[in-house]
Image: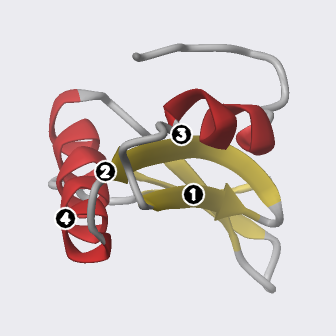
Amino acid sequence: MIRLTNAEIDYQAVTEQVRRKDCGAVVLFLGTELGEVSVAVAVSCPHRAQAFEAGRYAIDRLKEVVPIWKKENWADGSTEWVHPGTEPIKQKE
């Protein structure tokens, strides 16, 4: 299941949506910036190692195919938009 939203991510609900009786492991990855959850990936598998491997694959694949930008805020007041594979765009605000 893939869901895009502007609303706050309910990661507990995401976790519950992937739980299965025949799976003994659930892995949840939360991507944050300054404390706000901006991406959640949850997987369930019969075994722990499979769940971690599937979770890593899912977030790595997501970062490959979805244009996810991250805004870095620096102590000097400048900000920087970062996207994998591109040069940062730094600006003063």
Check disc 3 and give the amino acid type.
Arg
The image shows residue 90 at horizontal and vertical percentages of: 51, 60
Residue shown at 39% from the left, 46% from the top: 43
Displayed quadrant of residue 10: top right
The mark nearer the N terminus, 4 or 2, is: 4
The amino acid type of the residue labelled 2 equals: Ile
Q: Mark 4 packing: few (<14 Cα in 10 Å), some, or many (20+)?
A: some
> 77 or 6: nearer the eye?
6
The kind of residue on which mark 1 rests is Gly
Q: Earlier in the sequence, mark 2 or mark 1?
A: 1
3D distance between C-alphas at marks 3 and 4: 14 Å
- Mark 3 = which residue? 19
Element on which disc 3 rests: loop
Contact, mark 2 vs mark 1 (Cβ under 8 Å): yes
Three-letter residue code for mark 4: Gln
Q: Earlier in the sequence, mark 2 or mark 3?
A: 3
Residue at the spot 63% in from the left edge and 43% down from the top edge: 15
N-terminal of the pair, mark 4 or mark 1, is: 1
Q: Earlier in the sequence, mark 3 or mark 1?
A: 3
Find numbered disc 1 in the image and state the secondary structure of the residue it sits on.
Answer: strand
Instruction: Indicate whether 78 appears above or below 45.
Output: below
The residue wearing badge 1 is: 31
For the residues carrying marks 4 and 1, which lies nearer the camera in this image?
A: 4
| Rendered location of residue 61, percent (x, y) | 17, 43
- N-term mark: 3 or 4: 3
* SS for callout 4: helix
Q: Which numbered dot is residue 50?
A: 4
**53 relative position to 8: left or right:** left
Neighbor class of circle 2 (other Cα within 10 Å; few <14, some 14-19, many 20+) is some
